[in-house]
Amino acid sequence: MPTIAGSEKSKSTETPQKRKLRSEELNLVSENTISTPKKLKSRRCCFQSQHAREVKQDYNENLANPVNFAMENSSDCSGSKPKWNLKDEEQMRAVKEALHVSKAPSTVVCREDEQRHVFEFLKGCLDQQKAGSLYICGCPGTGKSLSMEKVVKQVGDWSKQAGLPPVDTLSVNCTSLTKATDIFSKILEIVEPLKKNNCHSSPLQHLQSLFSQKQESSSRMMLIIADEMDFLITKDRGVLHDLFMLTTLPFSRCILIGVANAIDLADRFLPKLKSLNCKPMVLTFRAYSKDQILRILQERLMVLPYVAFQSNALELCARVSIRLLLVA
């Protein structure tokens, strides 16, 4: 039968189908399956993260330029003063002058405790009419010299009210001396202003002779303020030692206050004084804190008839100042 033969022939000539592997079946299933969409962030989260980045960037820029930030955000905080004009050259000059370090403030703030200690020390010496020594130390720019000027004025007013004789005051910046021993000549000019020194003795020897014998009852107490005292340090430390020893002589009427930056000067350069039990009292002026710097800035700007800086801008400047001090 031809039809049957043809069908058998066609079956014999067909090529067998290739068997599919399991990996191909898995790939085919994965291609046909619908992938789940990714979870989208909400608009609120995106806005918050973007806002946080912008705030952080602005904060870093403000730290880099605190003065510019303060000027741009100046406003009338108290309501009693008008806002300053940034384009007014006269107002800009007044603000710079008020904040300049060479401008002596009308009041010395944040050093009330230190000034009270110095005043009590001087008051005790004047009440008992006896000599004494005080060493004031601290980092540069901590208000040591300004505090001394204020205390000297307070002591003068107090002694006048108490009916005590006026105090002879000698303020010497040791950087202005040609040589360290010149400080004894300065002291001698106060003790004996109308007498010339005997050429056979040095000013130090003359002072030692005067303070070793009884003086007239009318002789007044003398206050010696040696600023930048570390410039008196010599190779043998003799000048510093002799200067402090003047206050230990039996009839000395000298009150010595030394001001310097070295905190351990009394321990390193005056070991003999410690052995002789005549080591001076030590008062340390600590570095300003952030709150103290903020108060100083506010006090300096109070003299202006307008508000120059916003309170948060001044606080930022105080924080940056502390960071610079820590880095230095």
Image (spheres, grey):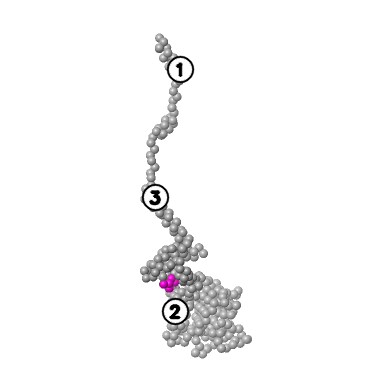
Q: Is residue 82 above or below residue 197?
A: above
- Mark 2–mark 1 CB contact (< 8 Å): no
**Which residue is drawn at the image coordinates 49% and 80% (left, top)?**
132
Q: Amino acid at mark 2?
A: Glu
Q: Is residue 253 above or below residue 19?
A: below
Q: Which residues are magenta?
A: 299-305
Q: Amino acid at mark 3?
A: Cys
**Which residue is drawn at the image coordinates 43% and 55% (left, top)?**
54
Give the residue at the far front of this rendering.
Answer: 88
Residue on which the image places disc 3: 46
The CA distance from mark 3 to mark 2 is 63 Å
> Disc 2 or disc 1, which is closer to the eye?
1
Q: Earlier in the sequence, mark 3 or mark 1?
A: 1
Mark linked to residue 13: 1
Q: Amino acid at mark 1?
A: Thr
Q: Residue 268: x, y in percent?
A: 55, 72
Q: Earlier in the sequence, mark 2 or mark 1?
A: 1
Q: Earlier in the sequence, mark 3 or mark 2?
A: 3
Location of residue 3 by image quarter:
top left
